Image: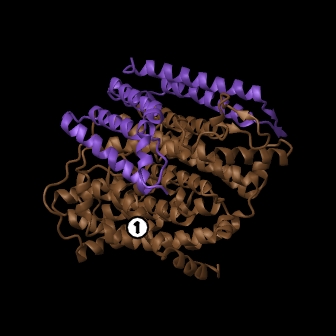
């Protein structure tokens, strides 16, 4: 803990290097852009840009990709407020009051409070990340295979519990993700598994083509014939700075949204969507005038916007300190860390302090950049929405396929991306969510290794997962998340989707 | 056919069962080992089994529960449009190495823009050519991605040598 401040100062030394500042700027700008554009999310963007980052140093690359993650949270509020279409699912709630404010001619203060709330919450989240990640990593050093297995089971169970569609379908996606993630040579015996005799599959399915297919190509195919129409509110946006009364009403919601979002984001599997709903519900409950919510209450914009930014930063804690992603976005980032030759998990902070502290310091800087980018450049981002969807879709498809090709200079990866694109369309039509699949795909190999090692250690007894305290707690939590919906027939995540 | 929720469920369950059966059989072939010494197929076998159980449980639950039956109907889907786009993209993957990035990309971009809703050919051609050259400049020149030259490989020999 005493080493935190000197390490952070060292991190600032790295993050302030010109090339890292540039990549942080590119990352947050790209993040804001994809956040503004409905249909193209940070997950797909990270996957698309992944091959292009191979020539960069791991520090610059992770700084840029992280910038996309938290930058998208800022950008997504713009479309929610001006179009009533969330740029990302994590800004669904902002539509409720943000759009009503815009209709009443208060788009400026709505955008302003969204940017300030995002900045304050994002900055608090990074302070929390600075303090908690090292503590959690030190604790996680005591973890053995059973604890890791139980933790991953808990994370996957939480993801399925919080899925917006059927929990059974989400569990099926988890099982499929584990199967697909383990394709390739067995890590212990090196025997080929489900490779169909193809040499290309010896290393298993690569993450990038899979994600490009599921998120990029599937999105384009799904929208063919029904292009997204973006109609912005007419007139210039005036008065971005909220009034004194706006601030008075927003300070409490921002603080509560920040704390709630951050601590929920830290929990593996919770992600960023559910906390904003809880934050909105909490504010409505606490408000003396709950009837104003839904008709343009500024608290209804401030709280969820603070919450989604804090929870996004919170999701970096299990990623960096445990090597456990919380959602599809951090799962892809985890895959990227592995590609750069880093070892995600409790040893990352000790073995690669430059990367960890450099990225943390860049987040402080990135949040300031985002505030500057979001306030005066809002009209520029709004203008981006006028790009006709047919042209945007052609670029998404091109970068998905060429990105897949450039991984190994092989058309096999293009076919993999196309295959997952088809699968993605079917999944959308049959209401299967891709997030549990991607999460399980990334965690699958680690889950398998932990399970097999645990069983070897215990001579085949499953009781090992319940005898060690931390493992038993994780397993108990997982059991609770499976049993609760069976008893109550209600789930928190049910129905929370971007479409609704 | 896909408009009928029941038919969709039957086909979906059958597909999942077939997939999980294949995974289980394959895992038995490669060896699941014993609990004290799990083999390479261990995780596949149990994942396949869980998948099969869930595939059956889903429709069963929907039959029993009134609430689950009231799920939203599948959206109207222009499958011919999707299939056509997939054929275009499949052909793009097939020919990109033989014909090269520039030619195949220009054709693919034009066709995708057309399928996505742009109907004016002058715009389509202008966009396809401009976007292809722009993408080439970003990918090959700036990011130095190795793109297949194909038929236009001779152009590279005329460029500056590094």
Residue A470 in percent (x, y) is at 71, 58
Which residue is found at the position 46% from the left and 44% from the top? B147
Extreme-front residue of the structure: B158
Left or right: B1 in relation to A344: left
Extreme-left residue of the structure: A235
Q: Nearer the viewer, residue B87 or A483?
A: B87
Q: Nearer the viewer, residue A128 or A386?
A: A386
**Residue at mark 1:** A25
Left or right: B34 in relation to B154: right
Residue B73 in percent (x, y) is at 36, 27
Which residue is found at the position 50% from the left and 32% from the top? A419
Residue A341 in percent (x, y) is at 64, 58
| Above or below, A112 relative to A226 | below
Q: Nearer the viewer, residue A222 or A117?
A: A222
Q: Quadrant of the N terminus of chain A?
A: bottom right
| Above or below, A398 relative to B162 | above
| Above or below, A118 relative to A407 | below
Q: How many marks?
A: 1
Q: Image quadrant of residue B116?
A: top left
Left or right: B52 in relation to A60: right
Q: Residues within 10 Å of mark 1 (few under 14, many from 20)?
A: many
Q: Quadrant of the C terminus of chain A?
A: top left
Q: Colour of chain B?
A: purple
Left or right: A444 in relation to A9: right
Q: Image quadrant of residue A228?
A: top left
Q: Secondary structure at mark 1?
A: helix
Chain of the residue displaying label 1: A
Which residue is found at the position 43% from the left and 55% from the top? B160
Whether residue A494 can be seen here: no
Chain corresponding to brown in the figure: A
Residue A430 in percent (x, y) is at 44, 30
| Above or below, A305 relative to A417 | below
């Amino acid at each position: 803990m005493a080493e935190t401040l000197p390490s952070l100062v060292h991190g600032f030394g790295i993050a302030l290097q010109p090339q890292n500042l540039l990549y942080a700027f590119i990352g947050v700008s790209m993040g804001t852009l994809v956040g503004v554009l409905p249909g193209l999310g940070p997950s797909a963007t990270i996957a698309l840009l992944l091959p292009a980052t191979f020539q960069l140093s791991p520090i610059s690359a992770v700084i840029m990709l992280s910038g996309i993650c938290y930058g998208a949270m800022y950008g997504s509020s713009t479309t929610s407020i001006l179009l009533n279409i969330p740029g990302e699912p994590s800004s669904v709630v902002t539509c409720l009051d943000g759009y009503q404010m815009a209709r009443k001619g208060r788009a400026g203060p709505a955008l302003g409070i969204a940017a300030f709330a995002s900045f304050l919450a994002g900055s608090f989240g990074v302070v929390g990340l600075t303090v908690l990640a090292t503590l959690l990593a030190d604790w996680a050093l005591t973890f053995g295979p059973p604890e890791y297995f139980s933790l991953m089971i808990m994370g996957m169970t939480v993801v399925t519990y919080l899925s917006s569609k059927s929990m059974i379908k989400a569990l099926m996606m988890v099982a499929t993700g584990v199967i697909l993630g383990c394709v390739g040579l067995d890590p212990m015996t090196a025997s080929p598994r489900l490779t169909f005799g193809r040499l290309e599959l010896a290393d298993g399915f690569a993450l990038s083509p899979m994600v490009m297919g599921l998120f990029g190509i599937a999105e384009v195919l799904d929208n063919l014939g029904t292009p997204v129409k973006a109609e912005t509110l007419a007139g210039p946006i005036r008065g971005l700075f909220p009034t004194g009364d706006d601030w008075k009403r927003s300070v409490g919601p921002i603080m509560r949204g920040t704390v709630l979002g951050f601590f929920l984001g830290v929990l593996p599997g919770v992600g960023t969507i559910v906390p904003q709903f809880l934050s909105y519900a909490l504010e409505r409950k606490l408000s003396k005038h709950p009837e104003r919510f839904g008709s343009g209450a500024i608290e209804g914009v401030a709280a969820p916007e603070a919450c989604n930014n804090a929870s996004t930063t919170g999701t970096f804690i299990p990623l960096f300190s445990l090597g456990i992603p919380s959602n599809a976005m951090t799962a892809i980032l985890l895959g990227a860390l592995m590609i750069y030759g880093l070892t995600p998990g409790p040893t990352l902070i000790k073995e690669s302090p430059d990367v960890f502290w450099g990225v943390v310091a860049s987040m402080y800087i990135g949040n300031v950049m985002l505030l500057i980018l979001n306030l005066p450049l809002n009209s520029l981002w709004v203008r981006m929405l006028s790009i006709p969807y047919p042209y945007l879709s052609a670029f998404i498809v091109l970068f998905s396929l060429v990105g897949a090709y450039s991984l190994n200079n092989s058309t096999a990866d293009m076919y993999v991306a196309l295959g997952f694109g088809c699968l993605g369309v079917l999944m959308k039509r049959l209401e299967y969510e891709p997030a549990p699949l991607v999460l399980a795909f990334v965690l699958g190999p680690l889950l398998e290794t932990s399970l097999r090692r645990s069983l070897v250690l215990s001579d085949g007894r499953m009781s090992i997962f319940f005898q060690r305290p931390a493992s038993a707690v994780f397993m108990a939590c997982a059991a609770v998340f499976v049993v609760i919906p069976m008893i109550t027939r209600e789930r928190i995540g049910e129905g929370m989707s971007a479409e609704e | 056919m896909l408009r009928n929720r029941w038919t969709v469920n039957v086909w979906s369950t059958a597909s999942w069962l077939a997939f999980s059966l294949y995974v289980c059989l394959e895992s038995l072939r490669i060896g699941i080992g014993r609990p004290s010494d799990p083999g390479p197929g261990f995780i596949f076998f149990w994942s396949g089994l869980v998948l099969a159980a869930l595939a059956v449980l889903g429709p069963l639950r929907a039959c029993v529960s009134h609430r689950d039956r009231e799920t939203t109907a599948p959206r109207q889907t222009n499958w011919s449009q999707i299939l056509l786009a997939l054929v275009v993209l499949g052909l793009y993957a097939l020919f990109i190495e033989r014909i090269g990035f520039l030619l195949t990309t220009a054709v693919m971009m034009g066709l995708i823009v057309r399928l996505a809703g742009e109907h004016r050919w002058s715009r389509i051609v202008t966009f396809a050519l401009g976007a292809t050259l722009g993408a080439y400049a970003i990918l090959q020149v700036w990011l130095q991605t190795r793109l297949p030259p194909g038929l236009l490989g001779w152009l590279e020999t005329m460029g500056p040598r590094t």
